[in-house]
Amino acid sequence: MFKTHLLIAWRNLRKKRVFALINILGLALGFACGILIFLFVNHHLQFDNFHNNEDRIYRVVTEERRDDVEYESAVPPGFAKAFQSDYDFAEEVASYYYREDWQIDGADEKNSKRFREDIAFSESSFFRIFDFPLVDQLSGRTLEEPNTAYITQSFATKMFGEQNPLGQNFILENQETIEVIGILKDLPANSMISTPIFISYPSIKAYDDFIYSGSWGGINGSLRCFTLLHPNQDIAHIEQTLIELVNKHRPRSKNVHRYKLQALSDIHFDNRYDGINVSLLWIFGLVGIFLIGVACINFINISTAQAFTRSKEIGIKKVLGSNKKHLFWQFISETFIISLFGMLVGLFITLLVLPSFNSLFELDLSLQSLLDIKVAGLVLTLLTFVSLFAGSYPGILLARILPTLALKGKLTQRDAGGQFTRKILVTAQFVISILLIVGTVVIGKQINYAVNADLGFDKDAIVMLSVPEDIEHIKLEGLKERIFQLPGVENVTACLASPGAGYNNWGTSLRYNNRPEYEEFSISAKMADDDYISTFDLQLVAGRNFRMSDSITEVVVNEKLAQKLGLGSPEELIGKQLELNGGFIKATVSGVIANFHDQNFHLDISPVFIAPQTNAFHEIAVKINDQNVKSTLNEIEQKWRQVFPKFIYEFSFLDERVQDQYEEEQRLLSLSKLFSGLAIFISCLGLYGLISFFVAQRTKEVGIRKVLGSGVSGILILFAKDFCKLILIAGAIATPIAWFFMKRWLENYTYHTEISWWVFVMSISGLLLITLITISYQTIKAATANPTKSLRSE
Amino acid sequence: MIQIKNLKKSFRTEEVETLALNNVNLTVEEGEFVAIMGPSGCGKSTLLNILGMLDNPTEGSYHFGGEEVGKLRENQRTRIRKGNLGFVFQSFNLIDELTVFENVELPLIYLNMKKSEREQKVNAVLERMKIAHREKHFPQQLSGGQQQRVAIARAVVTNAKLILADEPTGNLDSKNGIEVMNLLTELNQEGTTIIMVTHSDRDSHYAHRIINLFDGQIVTESQNKPFEVNA
């Protein structure tokens, strides 16, 4: 019997090719999205799940409690040693200090390779905590020795080609020569640790005194502390005990630390500490279900609309002994066949778009990922679910058809039923489309607002050049001078970081005007020379710029500091003494600048001071004019290379850097565009199917109306008015839902755009227009046909 | 074989109730060939649908083979119908998506018959109906007469005791009509009971008994000397 079901299904598909194509294409797109979203979600759910001692591995993080709580994924440099030596909670403790884009050079004449790579300084215990297996190593050598490293297989090939990498050397940041003593298997893609080079921790001495010294004075955001606890530890007890360390090492600090143990399985999903926002995964999952749902709705609508054209077949089968159960399962079989085709096409589409998907989400999914048992499970689940979900309602309707009416050809749409359900389903499709369109428009609007808002500083035509760390100030001054001489350059400044950089944020404590206590809030340090204010066009509102000197005697602060200190006006700050950075800086306020957005719009403007700490300058900012930009950039590069011939030259534009702060939002926008586009496209496929069918059904009516004097517009209105009504109903349903969710999303931003009324009007009108275009082809075709023909054909 | 008493059938729409059959009493013995005649809308097809257990009467009783079937649920009616009853329609009602062979095979599938047995029976009946050479064709590729022969093949392939024919020659030319009537007569002579609704006086003369319906009631009932086969 099943064979007969399949046979009829297959022949029906061939006979009604257009409808089959609409169903298959819609389902294929839905399935492709579903599979891609599954791969994405699965990738994230699998993070760091391959370590043997997974359940005992923790990262120690810090809650910084001032007037509010800030969350740091790092601990003070002295923490790891104290946690290991003062307590017996841990089997292993390891510090891991990572740096991005450090320069690597070949160490001999035969190897002149030079590139940037992410590196980490890690203690040898790191490899006893995590399972990153060594494939080869020099015997008797360990990462305890300074200037040694483990590197991954891929990096070994990149750096040393076919040569045996063991015992080979490379130069790190033009300073130390590092010897390769171990080769690691490439790290899995689902690992939070992704650095290909692990340099022995003692090597840090040459690069970072603060970290090497084991200080408790502050936190460097790049320093991680991982631990493998003894079995059956009470985490709450450990965290409570660690308060002792704060009392011992930071007794008077207003930045009260609370050290917390974060389970390995939580690290990837805790967005307080650089993890991803887990709700995003659920939203993606929901969107995937929505898209498959939209495709299923097409199937249900077209099937139920066609139900009465199949009434003869159903009637005959009933007469010949088929019961409702047989007919129901026949329809489920048909749905299964269409779903199967949809799935095959969907898998093909998935393969086609996988490279773009990988690049959008920085993933490494391959054909292999699709051959996973879980994907096979998903495919089967989707096929079963869609066959049952999309097939059961039409199946029930068809099985209910009365054979006596069906065989006489007297069955009407009304008898076949499902009209009301069809309206509900089409409305549901419209609701989903409007929700996605509104979401897309609001995300785009927020990005546009953030990128084009007045940030309080000049970000246009400013070129940011990185400079090697620990470079003599005199050399930097020389370079600045040479660049400033160039005709296309308007201004130059050396600094730790530009305004709005989104990184190199250095928060520190503050004591104001010899008050007995440090303030409860932190202040951001923007180390820079005295050209910073003019180069970035920051606005002085009181006093003057600071004067450069060998030691820091003057600083400029922003208005926010005055507000935080509860002062009546910025002028009150002028001449006041600030003690900063744990007392390392004692300086007078020489000037106050207007507030500017130093961080992205998620965060409030914080108090800032600008001080000339020359050994902290990592960048040069060059304000250029808009004439001969290309040659100016070339000339800047030449000047830079003359001063730093051994270093890699890199530059970026500040406006692009500001935009990069919204990378996640840009990604979300791309996805929203894709998903809403797909939802609309799949819905339109369904609408096209429905309208084709309705037009065919009402050919005679169209003919009669034309004979009686109706024009094309009258016919168009005849078919369009029902859909327009449904869109308006959908708009009324979707508007409050979209408003609620997008308002909540915007609340993540301290500075955000508003959801204007036109967002909804535009989204609903847009959908209305697309719908009219979709149905117009078939409708106009019917309206312009010769009525005598249609009347004769009836 | 069939005994109906005081049978009524009414159809109710939102505003109007129409009485399609009113106090119909009818007995059909096994092996009979009965023709039901009457003007359009007199209730012929309604009666045939009830006799064929496609529909239930509103009132009255219907005994089939001694069993009351007038108040059965659809599933129960389907169970009795399977294998016992065959249908032949004016518009043939073959499934367009199935070949001749597959159309004839369908009732046997619903009887859960084994494949080999089904093939044997279908081949035999197609041979008998002289349509075996067309077994792989689809209904649209056949003439009206051929389609009706396939429909008769489908009706008899289960060895049905009763064939209900609803204007079986209505869509055929006279030559094909005669052929179909000859086939039905042959089947009747072999013991199959046949009840046929028809407008055609000529076709009615193949029957043993002619029943005339008017406004949902049997108005006359007459015995008939049937035509001979090949007449």
Image: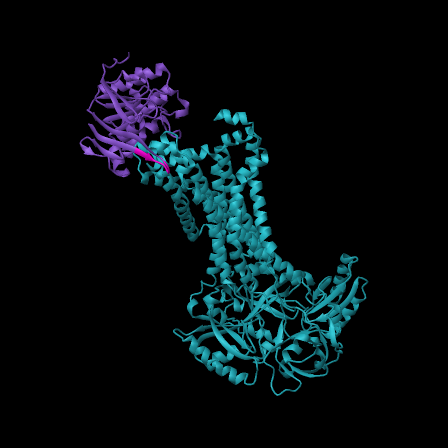
**What coloring was used for the rendering?**
by chain
Q: Is residue A105 above or below residue A384?
A: below
Q: Measured from the top left, where is residue A397 in percent x and y?
A: 38, 40
Quarter holding the N terminus of chain B? top left
- Image mark count: 0
> Is residue A650 visible in the rendered structure shown here?
no
> Is residue A785 visible in the rendered structure shown here?
yes
Side of A390 where B200 appears, left or right: left
Q: Measured from the top left, where is residue A234 in percent x and y?
A: 40, 76
Residues rendered magenta in the picture: B10-15
What is the display colour for chain A? cyan
Q: Is residue A168 above or below residue B216?
A: below
Nearer to the camera, A270 or A350: A270
Q: Measured from the top left, where is residue A294 in percent x and y?
A: 48, 47
Quarter assignment of residue A145 = bottom right
Q: Is residue A383 above or below residue A201?
A: above
Q: Measured from the top left, where is residue A321 in percent x and y?
A: 29, 34
Q: Is residue A773 above or below residue B174?
A: below
What is the display colour for chain B? purple
Side of A793 where A649 appears, left or right: right
Residue lying at the far front of the rendered structure: B15
Side of A484 where B85 appears, left or right: left
Quarter holding the C terminus of chain B? top left
Residue B13 highlighted magenta (yes or no)? yes
Side of B130 where A543 appears, left or right: right
Residue lying at the far top of the rendered structure: B231
Residue A654 highlighted magenta (yes or no)? no
